[in-house]
Amino acid sequence: MNAFLYALLCLIWGSTWLAIKVGLAGVPPFLGAGLRFLLAAAIVAVVAIARRTSFRLTRNDRICVLSSGLLVFWLDYASVYWAEERISSGLTAVLFSTMPLMTALLSVYWTRTERLQPRKLAGILAGVGGTALLFWPGEPLGRAQILGMASALGGAFCAAANLVIVKKYGQHTNSWLLNLLGMAIGTACLLAMSAALERGAPVHWTHSNVAAVVYLAVFGSVITFSAYYYLLKRMDATALSLTTLIIPIVALGLGRAVLGETIRESALVAVAIILLGVGIAIVPTPRPSPARGGERAPL
């Protein structure tokens, strides 16, 4: 079950970078993100009510809801949507792939919920390097692109911080309630930003960007975040964050299959490096067998 949901996350979120780009055609970024989570929150609310979910929150529940609402559904997605107006979806995915490293460092030095083994660190760094090789642009970058890159990195940090917070405090938090209330907070913040900063911006609805918003709400939000928080209770935060290294590979494959994009030889090398890095970081180290009888294990 865990392996299936992990693969599902990689597959769906690998397609959302392209869907965000399509959804931004004719729609301001904060408005587009806000409408995405407004629709997603409405769907989750129906599910939560049908499941008779209790809305009673403990202290730890409130910490997780505020963290998800402010750090992910607001700041993370505001940063990513804003970035994708200035840089390519591929470059955004590259910068977001630094999330596992940020997650590992925060888990070790902030929440102290994990240990940063040299093997895990080496795997993460290899994966980040492979992702950079996969999409990094060859042309010089302008001021707008640099700001977009900084925004994408900011979004990755917010996502990493939320991941370790929810891992520490959310073991008993209902995932449907977490998503519903978190999305509601994020929606309110995003639409408030849109009203303040995007007033008068032209909005042109088309079949393509409407379909993108619906896809992002249903598949890229409701299904994925339900699976995401389910897995977070059963996996290390760093291991779960490694999906951000596999996602660019999915994006590359979809670009080849759907848009007919060519794949460079260096991209194939990059894919191999990413998969190797993920394998090194996620496969547990074998534990030495205990000493038999009265023998002492070597020190």
Image (cartoon, rainbow, N blue to C red):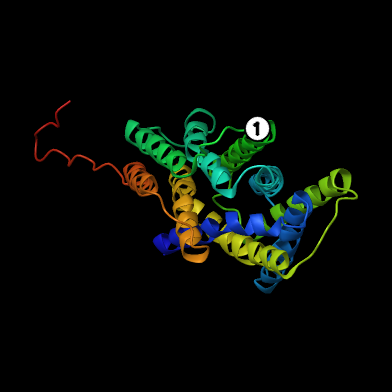
Query: 10 Å neighbourhood of mark 1: few (<14), some, or many (≥20)?
Result: few
Q: Is residue 272 left or right of residue 248?
A: left
State the residue lying farthest toward the right. Answer: 200
The reply to whether residue 71 is in sight is: no
Q: Is residue 189 left or right of residue 135?
A: right
Residue 136, how many percent across, how many down? Answer: 50, 39
Q: Which residue is mark 1?
A: 142
Label 1 is placed on what type of residue?
Gly
Image quarter in which the C terminus is found: top left
Relative height, residue 82 to residue 119 (above, below): below
State the residue lying farthest toward the top. Answer: 299
Residue 214, how many percent across, how many down? Answer: 68, 67
Residue 258, how many percent across, how many down? Answer: 51, 65
Q: Nearer the viewer, residue 236 or 143?
A: 143
Residue drawn where x is 45% and y is 59% of the image? 253
Residue 268, how many percent across, how many down? Answer: 36, 49
| Secondary structure found at label 1 | loop
Relative height, residue 160 to residue 41 (above, below): above
Relative height, residue 177 to residue 95 (above, below): below
